[in-house]
Amino acid sequence: MLACLPIAQPDIKPHEIMFIYRKRKNMTQLKVALTIHASQIHVSRIERGIVTPNETERSKIEELLGVRIWSKDIGQGSINHGTK
């Protein structure tokens, strides 16, 4: 009888987190693009890991999706940015 070993899951990358949370919110790449003042193609490239968003884009994406992606505590929801 063979033992069943758990399959190791690869670390999820920030661009994959972005894609997952955007889909969960039923949001289009265009909506994200309009929010960060970029093109839909740029957002697509971010989600595929081809480009890394700058600090301003990161902040806006995290705020829009309501989850920390590139910041400390990756994958945590409810971004407050100084509000209590």
Image (spheres, rainbow, N blue to C red):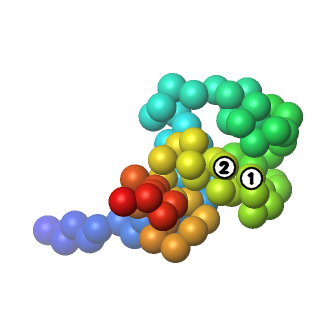
Is there any visible trace of residue 20 in the rendered image? no
Q: Is residue 8 left or right of residue 11?
A: left
Q: Where is residue 13 in the image (x, y as percent from the top left)?
A: 59, 62
Q: In this view, does 3 lie to the left or right of 78?
A: left
Front in this rendered view, residue 13 or 65: 65
Helix, strand or loop for disc 1:
helix
Q: How crowded is mark 1: few (under 14 residues within 10 Å), some or many (20 or more)?
A: some
Q: Quadrant of the C terminus?
A: bottom left
- Residue 77 quadrant: bottom left
- Identify the image quadrant of the N terminus: bottom left
Name the residue rendered at 51%, 61% in the picture: 81
Identify which amino acid the numbered label 2 is placed on.
Answer: Lys
Could you tell me if the residues under marks 2 and 1 are in contact, i.e. CB atoms within 8 Å?
A: yes
Return the residue at label 1. 57
Residue 17 at x, y percent in the picture:
54, 52
- Of residues 47 and 67, the one nearer the viewer is 67
- What residue sits right under mark 2 in the picture? 60
